[in-house]
Image (cartoon, helix red, strand yellow):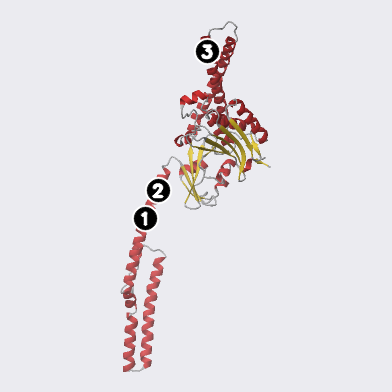
Amino acid sequence: MHDFWFRVSIPVWLGGAAAMLLWGIFSSTVALIFMLVLLLVVMVYRARQLFKLGQWMQDARLETIPEADGIWDEVFSRLYRMVKNHNQTKQELADELQHIEQATAALPEGVLILNESNRIEWSNPLSQQHFDLHPIHDEMQDITYLVRQPEFIEYLNAESDFSEPLVMRPARHDDMVLSIKLVPYGGNKRLLISQDITQLERIEAMRRDFVANVSHELRTPLTVVSGFIENLQDMPNLEQESARRALQLMTAQTKRMESLVSDLLTLSRLENDQGPISDEPVNMRDLLNEVYQDGMSLSSGQHAIKLEIGSELSLLGNRDELHSAFVNLVSNAIRYTPQGGEILVRWFKRGDQPIFSVQDSGIGINAQHLPRLTERFYRIDRSRSRETGGTGLGLAIVKHISIRHQAKLEIMSEEGKGSTFTLVFPIKRVVN
């Protein structure tokens, strides 16, 4: 750098030396005139080179870089190398961007990049198809202006970790079902990932219809068989102990099958009912007392069941569904708590959120089983489940009811130390 400035100032130093020499030979006026003329020539030369540089920078291409001599040739040579390196880097970035765009276009999911204001910064072709977006005109548009379904806007603005995806039908594609998930990244930006699950939904609908139809078909023969068994048990001449024992076993298994069919029908109804629930103010004190009495009846005095109502909050929801969810949690606690164990049923507030929980001193659950507890027919110990009379559908029913009420099911358990099942309801469901 120092060498560069030294070479730039050489003409000035040489002109100064020549002016001093002229001053000594002639006079100061001649030296001054010479110096001024020299400076003017240098300035004109520099200005000409700067003009050429300015003209070139308006369209900086390697093939049109100006020619010069002296120090300006070195300046243009350095600019040439800089522009060449810049163009090479730009081309590499363009190639990489094209590669990324090709990769995202090949993804089986739609991908949208949203900023902190929910404006679309970028979208791949599949997301444009899912949400009927224009790749140019809709760029930097607010996504909520283009996708107006209330459930989508509510999901987008929700204060949550977005662990559960939103399943919805786009307004302009009624025959399509999308699974949508938000993934925060890079500070305030978010990825909106959409997946077409139309075929999966059709298969799931077929499964639900099959289960519902089979359950309905099973109910009639079970009712007939149950009736005949009751008649046989009431016959006065049935005295053989083996026959009575067989009828008792048949009765128990028939009741178990009836319970399974009933749970299957309940689960099918919840799964098939995709519309909003019929909300009504629910008097929680009355509902909880009813749940408590159901638990006492099921326990038959074998457990110490306690009810704590720590809040007078009422809830907006479907009373029958809430009753089903609460009773399922209480009955689970009774089934898996040994005789003489304690069960605590609570209704209270955590901050401003209403909470329902069931705590037991039962056998507990190993941590590896917790993520799968709400799956249909998932059993930790199949032999013990048969002994307790469970259908394996209770927690699946609780999960669906909690989703329909925008509640969160929390499970805490330690093997040998009991379990706590908690339903956390959103503040918006509190009835003032």
Q: Residues within 10 Å of mark 3 (few under 14, many from 20)?
A: few
Q: Looking at the picture, how far across and down is residue 205, in whole percent? A: 52, 29
Q: Amino acid at mark 3?
A: Arg
Q: Residues within 10 Å of mark 2 (few under 14, many from 20)?
A: few
Q: Looking at the picture, how far across and down is residue 38, in whole percent? A: 36, 83
Q: Please report the residue visible at 34 percent of the width from the left and 70 percent of the height from the top.
A: 75
Q: Secondary structure at mark 2?
A: helix
Question: Which of the numbered marks, if any, corresponds to residue 100?
Answer: 2
Q: Amino acid at mark 2?
A: Ile
Q: Which residue is mark 1?
A: 91
Q: Looking at the picture, how far across and down is residue 322, in whole percent? A: 61, 33
Name which quarter of the figure residue 287 lies in: top right
Name which quarter of the figure residue 17 lies in: bottom left
Q: Nearer the viewer, residue 9 or 182?
A: 182
Q: Do the numbered discs 2 and 1 sit on residues whose CB atoms are within 8 Å?
A: no
Q: Secondary structure at mark 3?
A: helix
Q: Nearer the viewer, residue 409 or 415?
A: 415
Q: Which of disc 1 and disc 3 is earlier in sequence?
A: 1
Query: In which quadrant is the C terminus drawn?
Result: top right
Q: Which residue is mark 3?
A: 245
Question: Which of the numbered marks, if any, corresponds to residue 413?
Answer: none
Label 3 vs label 2: CA separation? 72 Å
Could you tell me if residue 271 is visible in this image?
no
Q: Amino acid at mark 1?
A: Gln
Could you tell me if residue 154 is visible in this image?
yes
